[in-house]
Amino acid sequence: MKQGRSIAFIGLGVMGGPMSAHLARAGHRVTAYNRSPERARQRAEEYKAQGLDIAFAESPAAAARGADIVMTCVGEDADLAQVTIGPGGVLEAMEPGALLIDHTTASAAMARKLGESCADAQIDFVDAPVSGGQAGAEAGQLAIMCGGGEDAMARAHPAMQPYAKAITHVGPVGAGQTAKMANQMCIAGILGGLAEAIRLAEGAGLDLERTYEAISGGAAQSWQMDNRWETMAQGKFDFGFAIDWMRKDLSYALDEARRLGLASPITALVDQFYAEVQAAGGNRLDTSALITRLPRPSE
């Protein structure tokens, strides 16, 4: 794909804001929209300070009008429906032959529904949820799992490269969202074990730094261990991906597992542990705050 495509980006949160900035740096003509006017104003100031020329629109449809590619990155199913197939949504303005890439973590059912709406309008569609968190978005190092047809994927791949570390075509529409569910199930299970391991080491009086050194070089090693062991032990939980959002993601995973007739007991258990953290006021803490439901040995 040559540089300078016209791209509309809908949703400028902790993920969408940096992603849209990477697109502008790559030479694309970006028009942005955010449902919260205050967030839009904040992003406009940030873009200006970074020397980025990103235009703003007053509605999703206005942002999408004339765009070659439209990208969405909002909160959940209802938000995605609002900015795409709802009144004033992007599908009202997109022309046949355009491409819609959705980076929202949504349900597979919503992805399939949106894919059908796009097909009816002769618009290519790829569901492309991302993993890597706020740090990955800011560094342009996101892992993107994609569902869609081969032709749509061929068009989407180069468009996503400015903020991607890895782009994987998993299968047809909805497959990207299902892969993201698997991703979140893995993260939840790992954090559950990591929380208990840290408390065990503390209770036994082990040096936590040396314990990390001892186990991180073997089969227990993971991204969560490497990046959250120290901060979990220190009680630091301000890393951008809130427990509220993880519980939303796990609800999609559990729903999909039930639809397929599959058991997910570990995911269901960790989801309830997160509910306990929410009940204690930890809704906006990072997912690693799962450890807070386990008192320190001295407490």
Image (cartoon, rainbow, N blue to C red):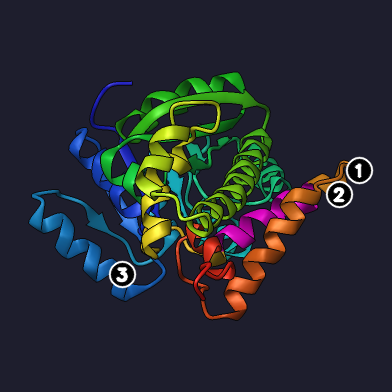
Q: Give the residue type that dot 2 points to.
A: Arg
Estimate the x, y position of residue 136 in percent, counting from the top left: 35, 42
Give the left or right position of residue 42, taking residue 274 as reference: left
Give residue 258's mark.
2
Q: Give the residue type that dot 3 points to.
A: Arg
Residue at which label 1 appears? 261
* Front-lying residue, 204 or 12: 204
Which region shows up in magenta? 245-256
Give the left or right position of residue 228, taking residue 37 as reference: right
**Predominant secondary structure, magenta span:** helix
Q: Give the residue type that dot 1 points to.
A: Gly
Give the Cα distance between marks 3 and 1.
Answer: 41 Å
Q: Are marks 2 and 1 in contact (CB under 8 Å)?
A: yes
Q: Is residue 69 in view from this perspective?
A: no
Q: Is residue 251 magenta?
A: yes
The residue lying at 41 percent from left, 40 percent from top is: 212
Residue at which label 3 appears? 39
